[in-house]
Amino acid sequence: MLRPFDYYRPTSLEEACKLLNDIDDACILAGGTDLLVKIRDGKHVAPAVVDIKGVQELEGISLDGDDLVIGALTTITDLLKWLDENPLPQLELLREAGKVFGCQEIRHRATVCGNIAHASPGAEFGSPMYVLEATAVIHGPDGERTLPVAEFYKGPTWNALEKGELLKALRVPVPPKNAKSHYRRSSRIQGMDLASMNVALMVIEPEKESDRQVRIAMGAVWKVPLRATEVEEMLSRGPITDEKLARAGQKLSDSINPRATSLRATPEYKKAMVAHITEDGLRNLLGMTEEVAE
């Protein structure tokens, strides 16, 4: 049963930000797949809810120059449909993340920006946005500002939004056409379950060893998604062998310190899986072997 709260439905960005600024502890409602569940279960007390679904400026997904702009009201289903209609193979990791996001009903309601704004360490789109080096577009009483997604995350369920601000959009730089990407996660069960951990991978210039760039980000292994910069440097600009991949996987395992209180996987499991998924995924992206099913 939902606990009572004041409900507001603004029709403009300015009105939405004014409400968020004037009302202490007001919560933003877009998809509501996290917020309403927490209010119902008594885990979150919301004196007021500001429903932004009536703000047309927050709708839509489009290409703006070299960036994919994902508006705050873009649902997971909207993103998957757009990717179907505008094929960008180098953004395959976004499709893969969307396909395993909850169930169909949840994908129709949950938003991509809401998934980032919730700032869960294991958020489905967290590690992909880190790998893509996306930017958060933030609107507030003083206008607009931008922040790398890697700086937007502050801690578990803690983001960089200040009083009166909301996440207006995500700007995602589209990688070069020959780039390859992959998203993969591990969960306790098949179907609708949150990730025990996840890995996002990108290889730019996969066929040119001298120019190759490897990007790796992991989710649910620390308090925020984590870029593996040292391992990226190890694997970029040079030949990649099975032996080098094995060393990279071991370095990834050694670099993370997952919390022992996680309800979805032990630290030992996460350490083993982050190495396995990364090695297996990179072999697949580089055409080294057939990807091995878990």
Image: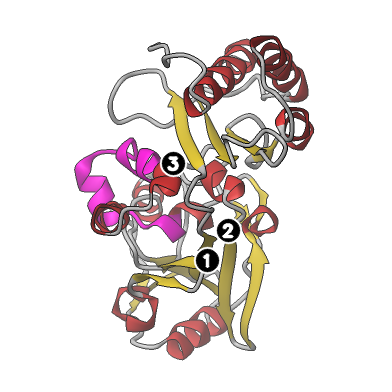
Asked whether, in this view, residue 223 is left or right of residue 125, the answer is right
Q: Cα distance, mark 2 to mark 3?
A: 13 Å
* The quarter of the displayed image where residue 50 is located: bottom left
Tell me, yes or no, if residue 42 can be seen here: no
Q: Is 123 or 96 nearer to us in this picture?
A: 96
Q: Position of residue 245 (x, y in %)?
A: 66, 17
Q: Is residue 103 left or right of residue 176?
A: left
Q: Where does label 3 land, which residue? A: 93
Q: Quadrant of residue 228?
A: top right
Q: Position of residue 172 (x, y in %)?
A: 52, 60
Amino acid found under the numbered disc labelled 3: Leu
Residue depicted at 75% across the width and 37% down the height: 229
Disc 3 and disc 1: Cα gap in Å?
16 Å
Q: Which residue is mark 2?
A: 134
Q: Main secondary structure of the magenta part?
A: helix
Residue sitting at the far left: 105
Disc 2 packing (10 Å; few <14; some 14–19; many ≥20) = many
Q: Nearer the viewer, residue 52 or 205?
A: 205
Q: Residue at x 60, y 63 (%)?
A: 135
Disc 2 or 3, which lies upstream in sequence?
3
Q: Magenta segment range?
A: 95-114
Give the structural element (helix, strand or loop) at label 3.
helix
- Where does label 1 land, which residue? 171
Q: Residues within 10 Å of mark 3 (few under 14, many from 20)?
A: many
- The answer to whether the residue labelled 2 contacts the one labelled 1, judged by CB atoms less than 8 Å apart, is yes
The quarter of the picture where residue 247 lies is top right
**Where does residue 48 sit, x and y in percent of width and height?**
43, 71
Q: Residues within 10 Å of mark 1 (few under 14, many from 20)?
A: many
